[in-house]
Amino acid sequence: MTDLLEAPVWEAAARPSDREMLRVGTLDPRRWVVAEDHQTPPEVMKRDLPQRIHALVAMHGTPLLVLDRARLVQEYRAFRRLLPRVRLYYAVKANPHPDVIRTFAELGACFDVASEGEMRHVLACDVPADRMIFANTVKRPEALSFARGVGADFVTFDSEPELYKIAKHAPGCRVLCRARVGNAGSQVNLSLKFGADSEQVVPLLLKAKALGLRPEGISFHVGSQCADYDNYRRAFETTSALVGEAGRRGLALSTIDVGGGFPIRHVADEHATIQSYGAQMRRDLDRLFGPEIDLIAEPGRALVGPAGMLLTRVVGRSIRNNMNYYYLDDGVYGDFSGIVFDHSRYEFRSLKRTAKYRSVLAGPTCDSFDTIADGVELPELHVGDVIYVPNIGAYSCASAVVFNGIEPAKVIVV
C-alpha cells in the first residue's frame, strides 16, 4: 500500500486510508438485502408459482425483485458446459447484489468491474483482486491507482492516451486492447463508444509494451443482447487475424476476451440464446484459437437475467382513451429502468385467468414519461393485485433510482 501513500494528494483523497476501508461495499443494505438479513426460507422457491408469489409478497411487500439462487447456479453451469474453454468474468454492472457475487464466486467465477466502486464492492464480498478485470476502457486516474493498490492488475484500453494514463498510474499491469467490431442488430450498439479500429490494435499493443505494460491480448464486444451470431463469428475471425499479425511483429498474445452480449429470452418473440448458438461458438473458437490462447468472457444478462422476477402491485386505476390504466408501485425510474437504458422489453403477467383487455401500465411517479407499457393484454385488475415480470434480473435494479422520494424494489436472492 506504499504507493497509495506516495500518490498525489488529489488522488489519495478519493480513496480510503487503510486496508480495512478498501473492503467497504457501495450498495444500500436496506434495498440490496442479503440472505442473513431477509431470512426468507429457501423452501418458498419450491412452491408452485401462485403460492410462491403470495408468500413472498406477504413476507416482503412490493415492489420486490427476487433472484432464484438455484437458477443462478443453473445458468452458470449451463454456460460452462456450452463453452468449457471459456473462463467467466461475471459483469457486475448487470446486477451487483452481494449474494449474486458470492454465489458466482463460490462457483469459481471471476468478475468484470467497471469502476473503483465496483472493485470495492467485489472486494467487500471477499473476492480477491486477482479475480477481476477492470474492463472499462476509459478509467479515472484515481481508479487506476486504487486498482494497483489492491492488486487488480488486469485492464482494458482502446486508445493511446489511455495507455499513457495506465502506464503512469498502474505501471506494469496486464492489458487487453479492445477492438471495435460489428454490433448490427444488437439491442445496444457498444461500438459507437468503445473499441479501436482493427488497424490500430497491434500498434497499440506494441506501444503498450514500449511503455512497460504487459500486453496480453485483445477484447471486443458484439453489443448487448446480440441476436445475430454472425457478429460473434466475424469478431472471432478478425481477432484471430490480429493475433497472427501480432505474432509476425514479435508479440505473442495469450488472451482473447470475447466480451458479453449473450442474449436471453425476455419475451416470446425473442429466440436467440446462448443455448441456441453455444455449440457453434465452441466449434468456431476451437477452430480459430489454439490451446495456447486463454479464452475469457464477460457475461452478465445471460447469467443473472433469467433468475430474476419482479413483483409489483396495482396502486391505482382509471380509464383513459378507452383503455384500462393501471398504476404500479414500480416504474421506469425504478426497476423498469431497463426499458429506457437497455431498450428491454418484458412480459407482464397476472395470476388472474379471466378475459384480457388492452391496457396501459404506468409507474408511481408524477412524470408522464413514467409509462411502462402501452397496449398490453391483461385481465381486469384492482388495487392490490400483483403483476409479475419474469427474466428481469439484469439491467433493472442496477440502474434504478429514487425519484419523487419513491424507493425502487427491495432486491433479495433466495
Image (tube, rainbow, N blue to C red):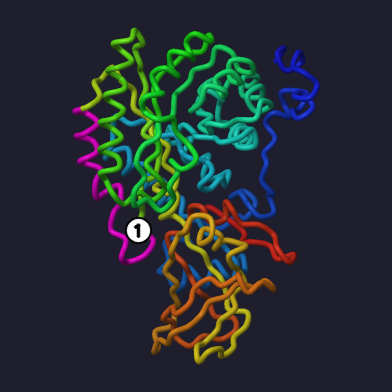
Judge from the rendering whether residue 105 lies leftward or rightward of residue 366; answer left or right.
Answer: left
Question: Toward which corner of the image does residue 294 lie, by quadrant?
Answer: top left
Label count reads 1
> Percent x, y for residue 286?
21, 28
Which of 25/397 is in front?
Answer: 397
> Percent x, y for residue 262?
36, 46
Residue drawn at x 46%, y 31% is 110
> Percent x, y for residue 79?
33, 42
Image vertical order of residue 97 relative to residue 346, above or below: above
> Percent x, y for residue 13?
79, 27
Which quarter shows the N terminus?
top right
Whether the magenta-drawn stretch holds residue 273 is answered as: yes
Whether the magenta-drawn stretch holds residue 359 is answered as: no
Question: Toward which corner of the image does residue 164 lie, by quadrant?
Answer: top right
Image vertical order of residue 325 relative to residue 56, above or below: below
Residue drawn at x 31%, y 27% is 239
Residue at mark 1: 265
Residue drawn at x 56%, y 26% is 128
Tell me where the magenta segment starts and ends, as one range. 265-287
- Which element is circle 1 on? loop
Which of 94/310 is in front?
Answer: 94
- Within 10 Å of the Cα at label 1, are there few (<14), some (14-19), or many (20+) other Cα atoms? some
Image vertical order of residue 382 relative to residue 176, above or below: below
> Which amino acid lies under the numbered mark 1 shown in the image of this protein?
Arg
Which of 203/296 is in front?
Answer: 203
Task: Report the magenta stretch's main SS.
Answer: helix
Question: Toward which corner of the image does residue 201 lie, by quadrant?
Answer: top left
Residue drawn at x 31%, y 20% is 243
Judge from the rendering whether residue 138 lies leftward or rightward of residue 195; answer left or right.
Answer: right
